[in-house]
Image (cartoon, grey):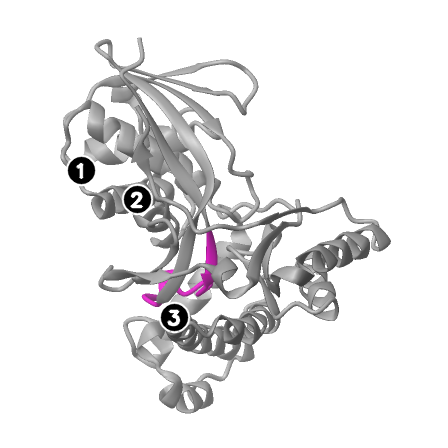
Amino acid sequence: MTEGVWAAPGRVNLIGEHTDYNDGLVLPFALPHTVVATAARRSDGVLRLRSANEPGGAVELRVRDLAPGHGPRGWTDYPAGVHWALSTAGHRLGGADLSFESAVPAGAGLSSSAALEVATALALNDLYGLGLDRPGLALLCRRAENEYVGAPVGIMDQTASACCTAGHALYLDTRDLSRRPIPLDPGAHGLTLLVVDTRVRHAHSGGEYAGRRAGCEAAAVALGVPALRDIGPAGLPDALERLPDPRARALVRHVVTENARVERVADALVSGALPAVGPLLTESHTSLRDDFRVSCPELDLVVESSLVAGALGARMTGGGFGGSAIVLTESVGAEAVTAAVESAFASASYEPPVIFAAKASEGARRLA
C-alpha cells in the first residue's frame, strides 16, 4: 500500500565550487530531473528499499541494525543513512517501504545522491510526522552522507535539492546557512545554459575529494583562521606569502577567488547583466583546473571547444574528476556550441556526451 509520493531534484552549481566545506558561498539551482520516492510505513522494523534504476530487486534492512560501515555497500547506503541520521537525532520512526525511480544521472556531478537522500528524508518526515523543515532535513542528509556513507561533502547539495525555487538560483552562505533566491532565467535574456555530462563518472567517497578537503583544513590551521572563508581577497597576498607549500597556496587561492566570483555572479544576475557571468564561469574553470586540480581532459575539452564555438563562458560543475560542465551561450548559437562539443569528443575518441539545456526548477516536494 502506498501512502505518498515525493520528489527531490538534482542540482547544477552555477558557481562556488569546493567552497561549501570551507564555510564559503555557493550559487546552485535545481534541475527538473528528480528522484521520485513512493513510500509507506511498516510496523515490523524493516526498511525495504527498491530502485527501478538498480538491478537485484528489493533490499531489506532491520532499522535497529543500521549503523555506519554495516550492511551492503552501495546505493542503499543513502536512504539507509538518512533513516539512521533521523533516528540517532532522536526522532521516532519505524520501518518503511521505499521505492525509487531516478532521472538524475548518477556520477554526473549533478547530485544524484543528495536527491536520493532528500527524497527519502521528505518521505520519512511526512510519514512519521516529524515536523522538520527543509533546512533541517538537509543537515541530516549531509550527516547521513558524511558519517554513514563516508563521503566528506559539504552542505550545498542537500540544501539545493531541499530548498531551491523555480526560476531562481540559491545564494547560500554555508557558514550561517542563510540563503536567498536569485533570479535565473537565461532565456529571458536570449541566452541558454547548457549542461554537458561527459559521462566520466566520479565518486565523492574517494581519496581525491577527501584530500582536497583535508588540504584546505590544514591550510586554515596553518593560517590561524577557522576556515578559508575568513581570508578575503584583500588578505590573500599575505596568506599566500605565509604558506611555504605551493599546493596549499593553490588551494587557498582557489577558495578565496571563488567566493569573490560567487558574489560577482549574484550581482550580475540581480542586475540583469547575464552576459557578464560568462567570463566568470571560465575564470572558475581555470582556477579549478590549475589551482584545485579537480578537472579532467574531458571537462577541459568541453570548455575549450565551447569557447571556440562562441560560448560566453564555461566551466566544470560539481566535485570534479569527471561529471559535468556548464556552458553559457547565446541561444542562437546553442546548436553550434552543442555540435562543436560533440565533434570535439568524437575527434578525441571520447564517449559521446549528453547535452541538455538547464532550467532552474522547483526543489523537493510532495507529489501525492
Which amino acid does the dot numbered 3 rest on? Ala
Quadrant in which the N terminus is drawn: top left
**Left or right side of 274 for 196:** right
**Magenta span of residues:** 12-24
| Circle nearer the N terminus (1, 2) | 1
| Circle nearer the N terminus (2, 3) | 2
The residue labelled by disc 3 is: 266
The residue labelled by disc 2 is: 143
Q: Is residue 69 visible?
A: no
The residue labelled by disc 1 is: 89
> What numbered label is drawn on residue 145?
none
Which amino acid does the dot numbered 1 rest on? Ala
Q: Tell me the crowding category of disc 2: few under 14, some 14 to 19, or many 20 or more residues within 10 angstroms, Cα based.
A: many
| Quadrant of res 283 | bottom right
Residue 288 in the image: x percent, y percent? Answer: 56, 68
Query: Residue visible at 24% across and 59% down?
Result: 177
Q: Nearer the viewer, residue 15 or 151?
A: 15
Local SS, label 3: helix
Nearer the observer, disc 3 or disc 1?
A: 3
| Circle nearer the N terminus (3, 1) | 1
Local SS, label 1: loop
